């Protein structure tokens, strides 16, 4: 998860990687996210909208995008610490073009509407983000997960006869686990990309929820996250093996915490595309 150690790791990575600096500079100058995200082969036409979703705790501003015709598996996206923003909308749209009805939410809706910050430099935005991150816990995540899944199931563009997926980045990784545990009969597949706090020594650690899940899983782990917590991947493997659930758990060499979103300071295109391809395989196989 975003913390002082990963911030230091990522700054060192960016200093030594001129291509990353150029990519991020182009994004910051508004060069266009779509140019960095290849379209799906045979991409479907989609319908997109900014919407408000009612939860037990308020109204969550969100983005909903789905193929323009037919009913499709629903997918709930939990953003990273920087929240709902253009990059997350673009990623959701790309997934919808592959045949999914996708909701990406502002997890901080209790405090403020998106956009939350102006950059994806955690060090620069730390004073804003830390209190917001600290305002969310296992209970809020579970309530939100139930509400967002219910919203998806109420949409004509979502096929209620097929399992639903969820995916999360950074702090969103453990949110996917709480979602899979909160509504196990609906969540058939889940993916965590450079997720933080998946395995802790606390009684509410997300990995302890695995026995209550029915979802097939993808864990795409950042190299520096693995270096900081090398045992986490083994704990996850053991938990899923004991539960009899398929889980692809891999450390992505050369990829730093936060490497997947195209507006990240440490965006790694090759590894981000590989992680995306594994996501599509997971959803195709598990959302039946």
Image: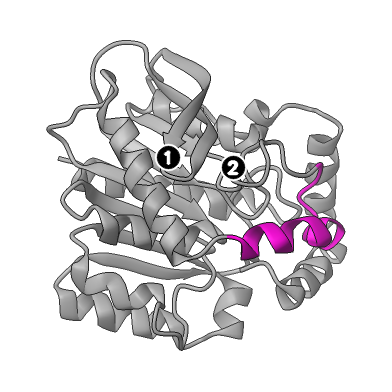
Pick out the residue farthest to the front. 57
Secondary structure beneath disc 1? strand
Q: State left or right for residue 36 relative to residue 96.
A: right
Do the residues under discs 2 and 1 have CB atoms within 8 angstroms?
A: yes
- Who's the residue at 53% across and 32% down the image? 62
Percent from the top left, x then y, of residue 23?
Answer: 78, 43
Percent from the top left, x then y, of residue 194?
Answer: 54, 63
Q: Is residue 284 visible?
A: yes
Q: Nearer the viewer, residue 201 or 47?
A: 201
- Who's the residue at 57% across and 41% down the image? 106
* Res. 55 mark: 1
Q: State left or right for residue 3 relative to residue 88.
A: right
| Coloring applied to the structure | one colour
Residue neighbourhood size for the residue with mark 1, other residues' Cα within 10 Å, grouped as few (<14), some (14–19), many (≥20)? some
Tell me, yes or no, whether the highlighted magenta stretch contains residue 102. no
Residue neighbourhood size for the residue with mark 2, other residues' Cα within 10 Å, grouped as few (<14), some (14–19), many (≥20)? many
Q: Nearer the viewer, residue 139 or 8?
A: 139
* Res. 109 mark: 2
The magenta region covers 118-135
Secondary structure beneath disc 2? loop
Which comes sooner in the sequence, label 2 or label 1? 1
Q: Is residue 278 visible?
A: no
Of helix, strand and loop, which mostly describes the magenta segment?
A: helix
Tell me, yes or no, whether the highlighted magenta stretch contains residue 127. yes
Quadrant for the C terminus, please: top left
* Res. 81 mark: none
Percent from the top left, x then y, of residue 97?
Answer: 41, 24
Percent from the top left, x then y, of residue 208?
Answer: 31, 78
- Who's the residue at 38% across and 52% down the image? 143
- Who's the residue at 86% across and 32% down the image? 29
Image position of 89 with respect to 46: above or below:
below
For residue 117, what is the image quadrant? top right
């Amino acid at each position: 998860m975003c913390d002082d150690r990963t911030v230091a790791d990522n700054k060192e990575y960016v200093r030594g990687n001129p291509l990353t600096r150029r990519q991020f500079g182009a994004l910051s100058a508004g060069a266009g996210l779509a140019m960095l995200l290849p379209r799906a082969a045979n991409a479907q036409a989609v319908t997109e909208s900014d919407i408000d979703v009612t939860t037990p705790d308020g109204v969550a501003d969100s983005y909903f995008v789905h193929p323009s015709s037919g009913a499709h598996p629903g997918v709930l996206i939990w953003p990273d610490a920087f929240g709902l923003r253009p990059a997350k909308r673009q990623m959701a749209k790309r997934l919808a073009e592959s045949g999914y009805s996708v909701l990406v939410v502002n997890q901080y809706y209790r405090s403020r509407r998106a956009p939350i910050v102006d950059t994806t430099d955690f060090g620069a935005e730390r004073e804003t983000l830390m209190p917001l991150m600290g305002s969310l816990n296992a209970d809020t995540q579970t309530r939100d997960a139930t509400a967002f899944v219910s919203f998806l199931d109420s949409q004509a563009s979502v096929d209620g006869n097929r399992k639903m997926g969820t995916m999360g980045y950074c702090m969103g990784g453990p949110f996917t686990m709480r979602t899979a545990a909160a509504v196990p009969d609906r969540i058939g597949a889940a993916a965590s990309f450079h997720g933080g706090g998946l395995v802790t020594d606390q009684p509410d650690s997300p990995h302890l929820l695995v026995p209550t899940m029915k979802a097939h899983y993808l864990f795409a782990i950042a190299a520096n996250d693995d270096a900081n917590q090398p045992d986490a991947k083994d704990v996850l493997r053991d938990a899923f093996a004991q539960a009899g659930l398929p889980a692809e758990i891999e450390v992505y060499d050369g990829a730093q915490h936060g490497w997947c979103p195209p507006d990240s300071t440490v965006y790694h295109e090759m590894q981000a595309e590989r992680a995306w391809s594994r996501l599509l395989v997971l959803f195709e196989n598990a959302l039946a």
